[in-house]
Amino acid sequence: MTETLFTNISQLVTPGVGVQRGAAMRDLTVIPDAAILVSGGVIRWVGPRADAPASAQEHDLGGVAVVPGLIDPHTHAVWAGDRLADFEARISGVPYEEILARGGGIRSSMRATGAASVEDLVTLARPRLKALRASGATTTEVKSGYGLDFHAELRMLRAARALQGEFQLAPTLLIHVPPTEGRAAYVQAVCHDLIPTVAREGLATAADVFTEREAFTVEETRAILQAAKANGLQIKLHADQFHAIGGTELACELGALSVDHLEASGPAQIAALAASNTVATILPGVTLHLGLPAAPGRALIDAGAAVAVGTDLNPGSSPVFSTQLALALAVRLCHLTPAEALTASTVNAAAALGLQGRGALAPGQRADFLTLHSADWRDLPYTLGASPVSAVFVGGTLV
Ligand code: NIG
Ligand code: FE
């Protein structure tokens, strides 16, 4: 097997392998004048250049900093239509929840997405996934959830599957908003028809529910998540975005991989997350775009929780096409330190997806890494509005 030794790395920066909780999120390893040995897409060795094993092929990275590839654990990158009218309405004062209650918002994206073919959805999603990858995301979660009916939900997941060869994707079935009539029957059909179909066809690895006043109740969520678990899917949740109605506590009780949003979480939800193995995924793009309170990232880490960061890329609440920007916003809006933000965007984001073997620069991990324009890795959390990422390597190959 060909071995490549990547050299001329000003700083190699990595969190520890596997999920990191609380203060451990700040423990980065920084190796000056480093090298990485890769073969078969996997890291075999990292360390100071002076100690590197002899290798046939050398790749000079140009004296810049190297960090792990980012992992974006929460996106809705597959959609059709736009939400530009919603944006103008919101800017003139109409709340997001009111637009949704009137049949707009997520429901308007459902109408447009429901009318699109798998091919249309692939064509629309590809440039979004390319933008996320150019910003540093080497693994990206993609949710369904804009399907007007089950056929449309399956088309969204098939679009994600079609893009799997070009990108490393983690597909999630999202049960997003209930129909305006017949919601009990809808929940039953989700549990007994949609979830088994998705699990049987291997179209998603996890199921997610939007638990909120304008979406699903805690009891509806419980039924859906239990059906997902019974069908072998992992579970996660959108909870506490506008109101803390009990979704976070339920997710922790059921052993969810992650609870995402948390803008309205208070001490009880923070304590529940800190006492669980469920990752707290914060989405600062939503705070920026909707003007919501920020999720309590600082308090979650201080309480001992494992925090991850995602873009929540979607047309309505977070048109953020950069995973690096989400990391940078987590520092400003949720008060993570730069080191915590890197951990949140790498190993903890992998844990939020139930993925092992990626997110850190260590032997045995996938060789997914980024070079920066800068010799100092702190330009990654620092830079706003331009990309500090100069090149993206997936499995040791430049993409
Ligand atoms: O994660 N909050 C619910 N779902 C998405 C928003 C989707 C949309 O507005 O289209 C979110 O923010
Ligand atoms: Fe979301």
Image (spheres, helix red, strand yellow):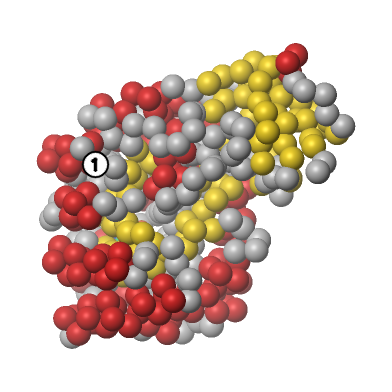
- Residue 64 can be seen in this image: no
User: Picture coordinates of residue 164 (x, y %)?
Assistant: 60, 64
Amino acid type for the residue under numbered disc 1: Ser
Quadrant for residue 331, please give it: top left
**Residue plotted at (40% across, 79% down):** 197
Ligand 2 within 8 Å of disc 1? The answer is no
- In this view, the residue in front, 267 or 198, is 198
- Residue 257 can be seen in this image: yes
- How many marks the image carries: the answer is 1
> Would you say 150 lies left or right of 256 here?
right
User: Picture coordinates of residue 336 (x, y %)?
Assistant: 36, 29
Quadrant where the image shows the N terminus: top right
Q: Which residue is mark 1?
A: 276
> Would you say 21 lies left or right of 378 here?
left
Quadrant for residue 329, please give it: top left
User: Picture coordinates of residue 204 (x, y %)?
Assistant: 45, 67
**Residue plotted at (55% across, 50% down):** 139
**Residue plotted at (18% across, 42% down):** 272
> Would you say 205 lies left or right of 189 here?
right
